[in-house]
């Protein structure tokens, strides 16, 4: 037997030698040797004095060196349990430690994060709790490399904890960036008290908070967070009434404010002062029964007795019995949703436990989108939430957010109306252009030449010298009137008449504005067919220069109600027979590129434009 180890064992009686070896290795000289009962002493008890007088021990001086007192010893949970600083958390600590006797660094880090309500953070091949404490400046260098926490390290960390004020981590929920255009949905929401208007963005139906308040939701705000809790108000006598307030159609923004509907943290949209939440997020309280264009919200009566309450970064047991809870936190990494599960055993009445909402807090590309209670177990209750996600896993919603997250509303609007450019490729060198050079095609003389733009100048080249790409399909998403007006007025356009004509080639749509009270008001929008890519409609600013009642008869057709812009470029009707009685072409292609360069309109629109627009009216083709 190792002589020094034997002497230490016999001197202490109840010495746990192995943990000391774990921490300090085989060389245990100058390490304090104490029983559990002696842990508060700084020196060896006087009872050791006579031990070295045993004549069987030859080198008493060496033994004295071994038992010299030290200030460090491994922390036990028995000691932690007597530390008054942990008294409010002792039940949770007992659950965490399990059968362990000595305090390990990972468990110590988890205890501190629990106490300070800090989420772990995800760093590959590292302990999330330790990494969070390192980030917050609450950890001792290399402490995690030891098997147990010494009393000195313990006190050093606890001193840092005592000085801790608030987290340095700032991980925003969502930014208030443009989401898109809200439209009235064909689906309506019904409860026993009323009929409510729903709105759509993409394929998601949304409902206004003001309507949820009418239904019986209590809506409160604490520290910038909205909390919605439902109280069933009972059945109303008589037929339901439409109780929704009118909502102006405009650009919706993602809401940076967290909204909790019961125990579901949901994303939401802002429309001025109104907030809209996904209809499916109300599944916490309602069964949603859809029949044709009617969605009936039927109170399910379950969740009022759940006994747990979510708040940012934490969950609290509000019941009178312990409960087991499973929580799902949902993150978006820019391409996919990530679910992180947290199971909490024996959450005591009144106890609050930190969640994992900041797990990816160091990765700015990962967005925390939702947190939900997935399952609850306690005496006489075993509840698994029937809806997997309550509409919190909508990929196109978050993809749209990522696309727009660096835009403001003005930038977003300007991007709605991109300038149209046709980029061709030179087949051979000519007129200062090189073979293979990319060129901007402005106009064409069909079968004869192209007019290209280079350094602000228009240069004519042979028809055969340019390769032209196929014509793209028009964008079918129509922009709300309010957005079009706001954008057009921001351009400060002027006209010599009270009217202005703008043709949006991207959408193959023509807008007509009239000046009212100093602002341009949109009075008509018309489906249009501009030129194909190989015979494009020139872009730029022009004026209505002449009226042409009809043309084309010498070519076997008739176009009516034409407004001349310049050269051979006009607004006109679709094609009729020579006598102008029957439409022979053009109606089926309205709204797509189809012409030889002119701008085709329906018979009704061309007639209205012809009869309404004064000469000199400004025209912008973009």
Image (cartoon, rainbow, N blue to C red):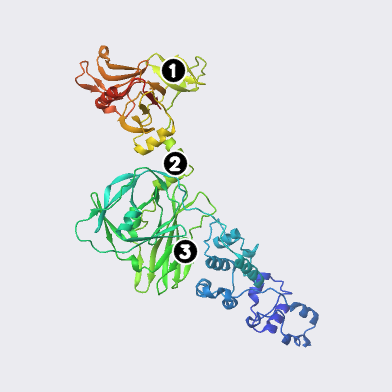
* Label 2 or label 1, whichever comes before in sequence order: 2
What kind of element bears circle 1?
strand
Q: Is residue 617 visible?
A: yes
235 sits to left or right of 272: left
Determine crowd level at label 1: few under 14, some 14-19, many 20+ residues with C-alpha closer than 10 A: some
Residue 579's place in the image compared with 491, above or below, is: above
Residue shown at 25%/58% (left/top)?
193
* Label 3 or label 1, whichever comes before in sequence order: 3
Judging depth in this view, the residue of 493 and 526 nearest the camera is 493
Q: Mark 3 to mark 2: distance in Å?
A: 34 Å
Q: Residue furthest front?
A: 517
The residue that label 2 is drawn on is: 409
* Mark identifier at residue 314: 3
Q: Mark 3 to mark 1: distance in Å?
A: 66 Å
Viewer-nearest of discs 3 and 2? 2
Q: Position of residue 520 (x, y in %)?
A: 37, 32
Q: Position of residue 396 (x, y in %)?
A: 39, 46
Residue 492's place in the image compared with 100, above or below, is: above
Residue 399 falls in image quadrant? top left
What kind of element bears circle 2?
helix
């Amino acid at each position: 037997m190792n002589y020094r180890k034997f002497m230490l064992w016999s001197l202490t009686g109840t010495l746990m030698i192995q943990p000391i070896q774990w921490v300090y290795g085989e060389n245990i000289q100058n390490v304090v040797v104490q029983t559990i009962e002696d842990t508060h002493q700084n020196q060896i008890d006087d009872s050791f004095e006579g031990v070295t007088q045993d004549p069987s021990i030859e080198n008493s001086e060496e033994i004295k060196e071994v038992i010299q007192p030290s200030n460090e010893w491994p922390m036990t949970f028995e000691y932690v349990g007597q530390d008054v600083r942990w008294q409010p958390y002792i039940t949770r600590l007992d659950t965490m430690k399990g059968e362990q006797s000595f305090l390990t660094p990972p468990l110590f880090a988890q205890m501190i994060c629990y106490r300070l309500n800090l989420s772990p953070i995800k760093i590959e091949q590292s302990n999330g709790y330790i990494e969070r404490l390192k980030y917050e400046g609450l950890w001792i260098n290399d402490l995690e490399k030891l098997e147990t926490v010494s009393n000195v390290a313990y006190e050093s960390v606890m001193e840092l904890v005592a000085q801790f004020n608030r987290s340095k981590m700032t991980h925003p929920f969502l930014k208030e960036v443009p989401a898109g255009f809200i439209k009235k949905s064909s689906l309506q929401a019904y409860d026993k008290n009323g009929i409510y208007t729903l709105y759509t963005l993409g394929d998601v139906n949304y409902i206004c908070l003001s309507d949820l308040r009418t239904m019986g939701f209590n809506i409160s705000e604490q520290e910038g967070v909205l909390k919605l809790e439902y109280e069933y108000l009972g059945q109303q006598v008589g037929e339901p009434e439409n109780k929704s307030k009118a909502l102006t159609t405009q650009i919706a923004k993602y809401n940076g404010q967290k909204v909790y509907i019961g125990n579901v943290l949901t994303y939401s949209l802002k429309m001025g002062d109104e907030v809209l939440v996904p209809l499916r997020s109300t599944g916490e309280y309602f069964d949603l029964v859809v029949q044709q264009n009617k969605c009936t919200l039927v109170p399910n009566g379950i969740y009022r007795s759940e006994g747990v309450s979510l708040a940012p970064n934490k969950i609290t047991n509000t019941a009178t019995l312990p409960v087991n809870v499973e929580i799902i936190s949902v993150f978006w990494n820019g391409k996919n949703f990530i679910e992180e599960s947290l199971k909490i055993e024996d959450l005591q009445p009144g106890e609050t436990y930190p969640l994992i909402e900041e797990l990816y807090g160091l990765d700015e590309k990962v967005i925390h989108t939702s947190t939900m209670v997935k399952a609850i177990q306690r005496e006489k209750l075993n509840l698994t939430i029937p809806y997997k996600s309550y509409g919190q896993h909508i990929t196109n919603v978050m993809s749209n957010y990522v696309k727009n997250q660096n835009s403001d509303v003005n930038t977003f609007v300007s991007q709605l109306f991109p300038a149209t450019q046709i980029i061709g490729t030179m087949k051979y060198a000519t007129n200062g252009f090189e073979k293979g050079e990319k060129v901007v095609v402005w106009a064409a003389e069909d079968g004869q030449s192209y007019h290209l733009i280079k350094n602000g100048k228009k240069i004519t080249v042979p028809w055969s010298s340019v390769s032209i790409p196929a014509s793209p399909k028009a964008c079918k998403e129509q922009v709300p009137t309010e957005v079009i007006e706001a954008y057009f007025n921001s351009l400060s356009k002027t006209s010599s008449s009270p009217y202005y004509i703008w043709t949006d080639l991207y959408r193959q749509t023509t807008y007509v504005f009239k000046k009212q009270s100093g602002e341009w008001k949109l009075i008509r929008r018309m489906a249009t067919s501009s030129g194909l890519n190989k015979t494009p409609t020139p872009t730029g600013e022009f004026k209505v220069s002449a009226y042409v009642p009809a043309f084309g008869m010498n070519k076997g057709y008739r176009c009516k109600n034409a407004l001349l812009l310049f050269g051979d470029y006009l607004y006109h009707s679709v094609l009729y027979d020579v006598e102008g009685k029957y439409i022979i072409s053009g109606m089926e292609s309205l709204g797509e590129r189809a012409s030889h360069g002119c701008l085709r309109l329906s018979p009704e629109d061309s007639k209205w434009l012809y009869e309404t627009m004064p000469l000199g009216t400004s025209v912008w083709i973009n």
